[in-house]
Image (cartoon, rainbow, N blue to C red):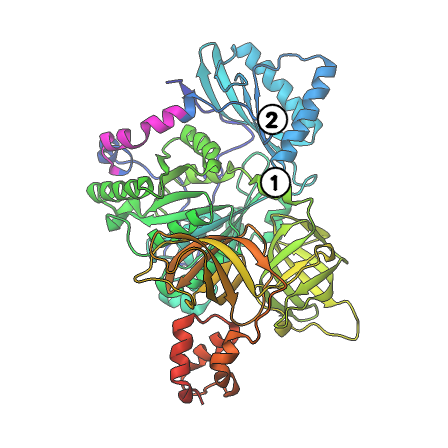
């Protein structure tokens, strides 16, 4: 196995060591500084985090050996470049290399990785110390020409000497920052909000959930300790890989998003999702509507296995083709044998038929580089063993996040007409109606005229973009792959755009798209789990991008019924209003828990129902005033108006409709 070592950049101190102590007013204890937790003699003797050495060796040593010794062949596309050597090139050759670096940076949206001392086929050869030093000098000069910063992040030894891995990242003032969205999911009480608070605020947890108070949005979340609404936090990295969230002294908690984003070359946007089964539809909306680039799945080490909603969340991520990495939490209070049971159960789950992933324990800085390169394929699942109290492995996790590659799909979508899927709306005093969402294609600019819709009649309204904000920072325009907030006004001055005119599931699109709303669509689906059979008339709730609405199963291809494991091409009809759908979009349908997944393969814009299904079955419910005494019935009434009822809820309400008066 090739010898691998790391190289420290003198200008890039470990951000974890630069963090200051801070009295965070969490739960009465002084907050601790985030550092790598010490390893006890017992743990050291039995492997990382108390795991048996044989277990660690059996489960991932072959995977790590393959990843580190055999790099994949160089690809002409992408942001990864191999160089055998760069010793004193001719001036004309130097300009060619600079042009090539510009291309690699563009492919990586402002970020590129160079492997010096490596052949184009991925073979690590290495260079003599003199040749390596001259090659790095050339690479640093190339980076300076394109106004970027080059940092040596790792060195490894080949047959002829040392090879270096160099991260090249554009300066934030000259290029739009790389944005990567990460969804945080996992079972309730697995430490999702606590880990997010530690990562973004820079203060370790006190063992009683103090760190999570920094990311909760509502008082009832603080009281219960459980997330019920999606919250967003950002983590910014400088061109050299330093975390920019952490200030000095008392500034540690008061770094604004604007300060972080303006100084960052790379920004990670985290979406903290709910783990309790009660809020499953909120979590599902977060995974489908916010379009994460990666998912961070948290597992509680003390459970001795995989429990609760963990399997459900993992299944959704796999169905949506979102690459996953796992963080096993609370290792500071977990015994060795329970930890071993948890890891074995996780590996068994990831290797089972239908999942077939390669789990890899990340224990060193070399593992971080190998895992960050391999995760984009979707075949490898990196696993971290971490503690938010001792700080164990948090430095490895931050380094991994720093090296996560941007998804190339966004670069390809930037040349298409603009399309923004709305996930929320607000009314801001002095500004008006503001919508937020993920820009799926094209570019949204201030002053642009666009179409907003569809409304309940399937119509689109012409609106004008008043202003655009990206991570709370005013910008002139934003591009595909970014989460933005857009202030809107009607194109015609005599009309006013109210908040009730906008809902989740609407889109803001370029007029060139000529959008049409549809009642009927065809999807290729797979039934994951269902206790009985599905027939025509089955009414689940459809989740696709930001659309969340009940739909009726109208036709089942060549099947009469569908059972668990069946695949079929089916036709659905929305029950409440037409929606704007995109061919190729993934969908998840549920009735309670997840029941099936699929892909939209056909839309039928010219087909309309004679009368919406809900008007035939429950119009008398909407005529009645909302209840004032029974809060539960009030919530049911509101859900009906939003179109979020599945078939069973609709039938139950119709049966007891007299009680809603």
Coordinates of residue 632 in the picture (x, y in percent):
40, 79
Q: Nearer the viewer, residue 306 or 227?
A: 306
Residue at image mark 2: 76
Q: Quadrant of the N terminus?
A: top left
Residue at 42%, 28% in the rendered image: 366
Residue at 36%, 57% in the rendered image: 209
Q: Is residue 287 magenta?
A: no
Residue 599 vertical placement versus 101 (above, below)? below
Residue 158 vertical placement versus 648 (above, below)? above
- Asked whether the beta carbons under mark 1 and mark 2 sit within 8 Å of each other, the answer is no
Coordinates of residue 301 in the picture (x, y in percent):
28, 47
Whether residue 473 appears in this view of the structure is: no
Q: Quadrant of the C terminus?
A: bottom left
Coordinates of residue 628 in the picture (x, y in percent):
45, 87
Residue at 30%, 61% in the rendered image: 531
Cα separation between marks 1 and 2: 24 Å
Q: How many marks?
A: 2
Classify residue 25 as left or right of residue 129. Answer: left
Q: Nearer the viewer, residue 507 or 13?
A: 507
Magenta segment range? 50-66
Classify residue 273 as left or right of residue 478. Answer: left
Residue at image mark 1: 265
Residue at 22%, 35% in the rendered image: 42
User: Badge 2: how crowded within 10 Å, few (<14), some, or many (20+)?
Assistant: few
Residue 282 vertical placement versus 136 (above, below)? below
Label disc, if present, on residue 436 of the rendered structure: none
Q: Earlier in the sequence, mark 1 or mark 2?
A: 2
Q: Secondary structure at mark 1?
A: loop
Whether residue 579 appears in this view of the structure is: yes
Q: Secondary structure at mark 2?
A: loop
* Main secondary structure type of the part rendered in magenta: helix
């Amino acid at each position: 196995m090739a010898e691998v070592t790391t190289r420290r950049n003198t200008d890039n101190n470990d951000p974890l060591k630069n963090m200051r102590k801070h009295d965070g007013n969490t739960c009465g204890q002084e907050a601790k500084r985030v550092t790598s937790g010490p390893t006890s003699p017992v743990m050291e003797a039995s492997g990382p985090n108390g795991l048996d050495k044989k277990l660690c060796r059996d489960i991932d040593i072959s995977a790590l050996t393959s990843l580190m010794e055999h790099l994949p062949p160089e690809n002409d596309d992408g942001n990864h470049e191999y160089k055998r050597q760069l010793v004193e090139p001719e001036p004309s050759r130097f300009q060619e290399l600079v042009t090539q670096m510009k291309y690699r940076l563009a492919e990586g949206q402002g970020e590129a990785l160079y492997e010096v001392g490596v052949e184009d086929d991925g073979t690590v050869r290495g260079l003599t110390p003199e040749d390596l030093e001259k090659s790095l000098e050339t690479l640093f000069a190339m980076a300076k020409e394109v106004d970027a910063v080059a940092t040596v992040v790792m060195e490894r030894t080949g047959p002829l000497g040392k090879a270096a891995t160099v991260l090249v990242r554009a300066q934030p003032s000259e290029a739009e920052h790389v944005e990567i969205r990460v969804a945080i999911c996992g079972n309730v009480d697995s430490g999702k909000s606590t880990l997010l608070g530690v990562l973004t605020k820079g203060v370790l947890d006190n063992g009683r959930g103090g760190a999570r108070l920094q990311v909760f949005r509502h008082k009832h979340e603080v009281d219960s300790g459980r997330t019920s609404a999606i919250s967003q936090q950002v983590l910014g990295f400088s061109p050299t890989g330093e975390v920019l969230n952490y200030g000095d002294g008392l500034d540690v908690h008061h770094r604004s998003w604007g300060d972080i984003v303006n100084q960052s070359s790379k920004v990670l946007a985290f979406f903290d999702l709910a783990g309790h089964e009660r809020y499953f539809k909120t979590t599902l909306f977060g995974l489908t509507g916010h379009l994460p680039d990666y998912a961070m799945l948290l597992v509680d080490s003390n459970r001795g296995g995989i429990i609760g909603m963990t399997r459900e969340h993992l299944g959704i991520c796999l169905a949506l083709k979102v690459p996953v990495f796992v963080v096993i939490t609370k290792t500071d209070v977990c015994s060795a044998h329970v930890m071993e049971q948890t890891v074995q159960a996780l590996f068994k789950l990831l290797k089972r038929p239908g999942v077939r992933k390669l789990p890899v324990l990340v224990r060193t800085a070399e593992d971080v580089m190998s895992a960050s390169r391999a995760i984009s394929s979707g075949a490898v699942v990196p696993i971290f063993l971490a503690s938010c109290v001792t700080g164990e492995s948090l430095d490895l996790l931050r380094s991994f996040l720093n090296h996560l590659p941007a998804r190339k799909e966004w670069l390809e979508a930037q040349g298409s007409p603009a399309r923004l899927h709305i996930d929320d709306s607000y009314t801001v005093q002095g500004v008006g109606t503001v919508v937020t969402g993920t820009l799926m294609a094209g570019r949204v600019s201030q002053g642009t005229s666009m179409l907003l819709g569809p409304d309940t009649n399937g119509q689109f309204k012409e609106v004008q973009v008043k202003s655009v904000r990206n991570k709370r920072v005013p910008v002139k325009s934003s591009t595909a792959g970014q989460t933005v907030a857009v202030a809107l006004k009607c194109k015609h001055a005599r009309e006013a755009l109210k908040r009730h005119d906008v809902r989740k599931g609407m889109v803001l699109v370029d007029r060139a798209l000529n959008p049409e709303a549809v009642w009927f669509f065809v999807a290729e689906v797979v039934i994951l789990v269902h206790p009985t059979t599905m027939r025509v008339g089955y009414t689940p709730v459809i989740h696709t991008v930001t659309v969340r609405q009940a739909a009726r199963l109208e036709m089942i291809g060549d099947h009469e019924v569908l059972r668990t494991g069946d695949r079929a091409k089916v036709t659905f009809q929305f029950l409440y209003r037409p929606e704007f759908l995109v061919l190729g979009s993934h969908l998840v349908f549920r009735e309670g828990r997840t029941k099936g997944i699929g892909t939209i393969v056909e839309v039928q814009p010219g087909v309309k129902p004679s009368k919406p299904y809900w008007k035939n079955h429950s119009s008398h419910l909407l005529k009645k005033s909302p209840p004032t005494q029974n809060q539960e019935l009030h919530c049911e009434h509101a859900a009906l108006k939003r179109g979020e009822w599945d078939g069973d809820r609709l039938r139950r309400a119709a049966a007891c409709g007299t009680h809603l008066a």
